[in-house]
Image (spheres, helix red, strand yellow):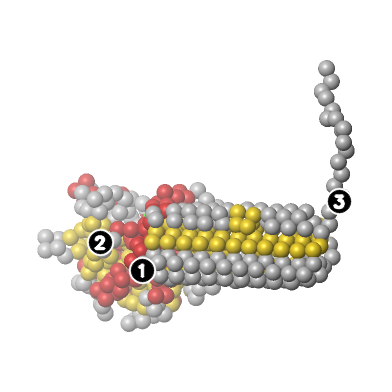
Amino acid sequence: MTLDIIILAAGQGTRMRSALPKVLHPLAGRPLLEHVLDTASALGAATVHVVHGHGGEQVRERLQGHAVQWVEQAEQLGTGHAVAQALPAIPDAHRVLVLYGDVPLISEAALRRLCAAAGDDALALLTARLDDPTGYGRILRDAEGRVLGIVEQKDATPEQRAIREINTGFLAVRAGLLKGWLAALDNSNAQGEYYLTDVVAMAEDQGVPVEAVATECIEEILGVNDRGQLATLERHYQRRQAERLMREGVTLLDPARFDLRGTLYAGQDVSIDVNAVFEGRVVLGDRVRIGPNCVLRDVEIGDDVVVQANCVLEDAVIGRASRIGPFARIRPETRLAEQVHIGNFVEVKKSEIGPGSKVNHLSYIGDSQIGARVNVGAGTITCNYDGANKHRTVIEDDAFIGSDSQLVAPVTVGAGATIGAGTTLTRDAPPGELTLSRAPQKTRSGWKRPEKKK
Ligand code: UD1
Ligand code: CA
């Protein structure tokens, strides 16, 4: 049966106390709604309808890459009213599955079970059993266990409130049936809303089978209404990712202090210390070790690389057996060959560094091309920016740059050249020679330090 998915996302999200629409708040670095859209597309929906309201423009703009039928619900008159806005565009014979933009962790597996239970002509509900069901709609059953209806918390009697089987909100049913029921909804209830949940009693009245499908995983049905709930779901999501990586053979020194906001491909025997944050697409080769407090975004790291504590790496390729850090910053468009050493307080930007080269202390390397086996001394700066344009520095193989030198680009240091410590290099240094710029050293004998006046 052709599947149409309706995602409800019109809620204001008042309790987030945010200028950002609730469904755009990130979970693992991506908007809540995007997680739901991914699940929808995994289910192979023919069309995904997103019902939006407040902040609709922003939501549409942020998710414009997704194939979505946007439906506006100008006034939020209830979940039944929200679903009704999308229904006219859906043929009667299609199956409708209702999802929620603020319930990001719903699993594909549970939804497949729900669709299977709906079959051709049943109404399927996803339910759960909660120790504390406060706030949820309760499932009403008869003595034989048949589902009779759903009563909302605010409309429930004390006896009904004691029921611990709740409505998660997820449901699947053929569009034709849903259209008939929604047309007959009224809002004579405690909240004055058109409740989607009232269709259950209508189905029961008409002899349409109602199938309750239970889920054991509570996190998958939890919605986000405030930042505390968002943090709870974030931790749950991260924990699941950490467990998966450990199953795949990655060592995480503390799975509770690991954050992946994107995708991580790890080789064999990779070890990741505490407080590592991975963003975008990160590839780690075999035996890579990541020290504590590192941030890696869109990087590719070769086998046997060690990234020591407190490094930030972004959009870079790090060659085999290189050593980075501690306290190093690797900025976009950096390409390091194998066995490169980048030490503490070194920043590298848009540069290529050849095999075996070392930049070990307190340096800035920007817009540079560095050859093989080059040694860059402590405190070396490539002066790549003249205030208007960026210029390139080229350092050829086997060159040695003395400490505290400034290389004023554009400039080239020839192969095997030596630059004396403290040099300000403004012209090319020829290969194989010593080049230095240094003020002559003077000593004034008998000079006295000034003394403080009494
Ligand atoms: C709803 C269910 C309740 C269930 C609970 C699970 C109804 C009447 N009740 O209650 O049985 O236990 O979810 O979380 O359906 N929305 C719109 N437009 C509207 C109203 C709501 O888009 O006019 C969206 C909201 O953004 C939200 C979702 O629908 O994502 C649920 O709405 P909400 O008002 O939070 O329903 P609950 O009272 O939680
Ligand atoms: Ca809710």
Between 386 and 107, the residue placed more toward the observer is 386
**Amino acid type shown at disc 3:** Ala
Check residue 439 in the rendering and tell me which mark sits there, or answer none. 3
Secondary structure at numbered mark 2: loop
Across and down, in percent, residue 254 comes to 39, 54
Tell me if the residue at label 1 has its CB under 8 Å from ligand 1.
no
Tell me if the residue at label 2 has its CB under 8 Å from ligand 1.
no
Check residue 216 in the rendering and tell me which mark sits there, or answer none. 2
Q: Is residue 32 left or right of residue 316?
A: left
Q: Is residue 29 left or right of residue 350?
A: left
Q: Which residue is mark 1?
A: 248
Between 105 and 360, the residue placed more toward the observer is 360
Between 343 and 374, the residue placed more toward the observer is 374
Tell me the mark number nearer the camera, choosing from 2 and 3: 3
Residue lying at 52% horizontally and 68% vertically, measured from the top left: 321
**Amino acid type shown at disc 2:** Glu
Lower position in the chain sequence, tag 2 or tag 1: 2
Q: How many marks?
A: 3
Tell me the mark number nearer the camera, choosing from 2 and 1: 1
* Whole-number angstrom distance, CA of label 2 to CA of label 3: 77 Å
Quadrant location of residue 354? bottom right
Residue lying at 25% horizontally and 54% vertically, measured from the top left: 130
Across and down, in percent, residue 133 comes to 27, 51
Mark 2 Cα shell of 10 Å, populated few (<14), some (14-19), many (≥20) = few
Q: Is residue 80 visible?
A: no
Q: Is residue 379 left or right of residue 256?
A: right
Between 18 and 440, the residue placed more toward the observer is 440
